[in-house]
Image (cartoon, rainbow, N blue to C red):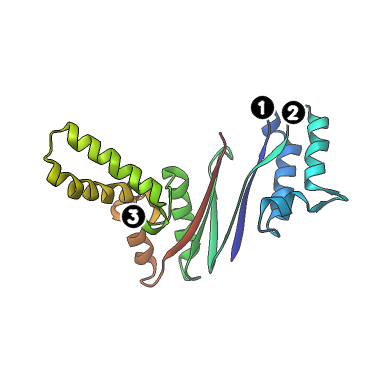
């Protein structure tokens, strides 16, 4: 539980996606993918005497649909757990700062949160500067349309940015199973020293 990987094996129809052999291939690929840190190395890896990339080409010919690896997301940490949403359309990994009593359930609950709420980053520090600048400009435009004085707009816009972080960063979001607390507060309720240190999310479509 110190490393995890999410991959998507993509095809063109639900009929193929639900096929038992296709699902087994996806699971076999996922087990192999855990040994690699990036998608290119994984595609070049040996899979039954041919590379993963060659296996994809082979299966494309056998199945008659384009088969390819889409997402490849790897996460490492002191403790990792995962969640796969019903239908295999969304999968998430969450890393905690330590392996503690109750940590496995907590990490799974937060992984479920990440699947449902699609945060863009772990916390404020993980949001890139371009996104922040764009959100501030959106807020400023709205405030101008509302007729707010120009001298006040900068400060009000920065205040609205706090709301953006609350809605869009994992640890600051309201916890979906108890909206009276944030995800960070929920994790601390499990263990006072525990933190979420990372997450990965992959979704089809």
Q: Check disc 2 and report the residue beneath it.
A: 65
Q: Is residue 81 above or below residue 138?
A: below
Q: Secondary structure at mark 2?
A: loop
18 on left or right of 98: right
Task: Kindly indicate whether the residue at mark 1 contacts the one at mark 2 (C-beta within 8 angstroms).
Answer: yes
Q: Secondary structure at mark 1?
A: loop
- On the image, which quarter does residue 171 sit in? bottom left
**Comparing labels 2 and 1, the label whose residue is closer to the camera:** 2
Q: Position of residue 166 (x, y in %)?
A: 31, 50
Q: Check disc 3 and report the residue beneath it.
A: 172
Q: Is residue 1 visible?
A: no
Mark 2 / mark 1, whichever is N-terminal: 1
Q: Position of residue 113 (x, y in %)?
A: 43, 49
Q: Is residue 176 above or below residue 66?
A: below
Mark 1 / mark 3, whichever is N-terminal: 1
Q: Position of residue 18 (x, y in %)?
A: 67, 33
- On the image, which quarter does residue 205 sit in? top right
How many angstroms separate mark 2 from mark 3 (CA)? 42 Å
Q: Is residue 117 visible?
A: yes
Q: Check disc 1 and report the residue beneath it.
A: 13
């Amino acid at each position: 539980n110190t490393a995890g990987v999410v991959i998507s094996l993509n095809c063109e129809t639900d009929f193929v996606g639900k096929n038992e052999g296709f699902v087994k291939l996806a699971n076999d690929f996922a087990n192999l993918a855990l040994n690699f840190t990036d998608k290119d190395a994984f595609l070049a890896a040996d899979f039954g005497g041919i590379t993963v990339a060659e296996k994809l080409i082979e299966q494309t010919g056998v199945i008659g649909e384009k088969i390819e690896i889409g997402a490849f997301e790897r996460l490492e940490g002191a403790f990792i757990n995962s969640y796969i949403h019903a239908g295999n359309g969304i999968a998430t990994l969450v890393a905690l700062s330590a392996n503690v009593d109750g940590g496995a359930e907590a990490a799974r609950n937060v992984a479920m949160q990440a699947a449902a709420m699609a945060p863009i980053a772990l916390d404020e520090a993980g949001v890139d500067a371009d996104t922040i600048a764009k959100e501030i400009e959106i807020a400023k435009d709205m405030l101008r349309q509302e007729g707010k004085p120009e001298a006040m707009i900068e400060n009000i816009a920065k205040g609205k940015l706090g709301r953006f972080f609350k809605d869009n960063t994992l640890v600051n979001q309201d916890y979906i199973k108890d909206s009276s607390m944030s995800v960070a507060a929920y994790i601390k309720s499990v263990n006072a020293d525990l933190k979420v240190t990372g997450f990965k999310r992959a979704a089809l479509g």
